[in-house]
Amino acid sequence: MQAQGVDMGKGLAWYGDGWEIFTRNPGMWIVLMILLLVIAAVLNLVPLLGPLLFALLLPGLFGGALYAARAASEQREMDVSHLFIGFKDSATRNALLVLGAVLLGANILFLFLALLLIGSGMGMAGMLHQGEHEMLAAGLGMGMLLALLLLLLLGMLLSMTFLYAVPLVMFAAAEPVAAMKSSFSACLNNVLPLLLFGVIYIVLATIAVLPFGLGLLVLLPVTFGALYASYRDIYAVLAA
């Protein structure tokens, strides 16, 4: 599972690949994205257990979308069942569920940290209300800022761990732990193109949500296609 470094310009070129993958069957892509968004919405409406279950299933759904992207890239027929193909084979399903369990554990940790930070902030606010010094207010603001930066850092590290772990499990039958290690290493070796990719995504996502979020029905499949293209370039030997 040796990853290779690519040029920074690939961070932009991958979106061109993703657009090409989307335009080969835009109707089916929109159906798949609507289905994915409905699943996400329904599960997240279920108190407590719904979001946890969605986190557990997310790597499998992500893998299904990447499988559809590979099918489109190879000019093969796409099908609704592609979204769930990661759950079909027992070995792949179990590996993806392991990834989901790690993601679930990370989400619970994030929730715990968020509640801890909110509780600390409320406690400090109570002290301020009782007339503490302005220095304490400055310290509270700095503490909350550092806490937010810590959560962002943890989120970025988690994303690096999972970004290529899912396609490695889906397409290379990698073991979950080995896939996560390889994904993290691949992201470290490609910081610049992935940073450019992320900045472009933020801009595109901001534009996509303006017309009632309808732009996401295009942006999401383009992004899945772009992510598959990035996997294909970074893991050229495995993707061949």
Image (cartoon, rainbow, N blue to C red):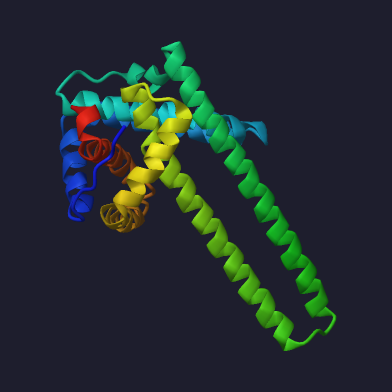
Quadrant of res 22: top left
The number of discs equals 0
Note whether residue 214 is visible.
no
Q: Along the horizontal axis of the image, is 203 left or right of 108?
A: left
Q: Can you name the residue that lies furthest to the bottom here?
A: 134
Q: Nearer the viewer, residue 143 or 72?
A: 143
> What residue is drawn where x is 56% and y is 60%?
150
Q: Nearer the viewer, residue 148 or 50?
A: 148
> What residue is drawn where x is 64% and y is 71%?
143
Note whether residue 3 is visible.
yes
Q: Quadrant of the C terminus?
A: top left
Residue 82 screen position, x and y as percent: 33, 20
Up/down of 150 relative to 144, above or below: above
Q: Can you name the residue that lies furthest to the right here?
A: 130
Residue 124 screen position, x and y as percent: 77, 72
> What residue is drawn where x is 23% and y is 51%?
11
Q: Quadrant of the N terminus?
A: top left
Up/down of 118 relative to 35, above or below: below
Q: Along the horizontal axis of the image, is 144 left or right of 197?
A: right
Up/down of 21 relative to 90, above or below: below
Q: Can you name the residue that lies furthest to the front here?
A: 2
Residue 68 screen position, x and y as percent: 28, 25
> What residue is drawn where x is 29% and y is 42%?
223
Residue 226 screen position, x and y as percent: 25, 41
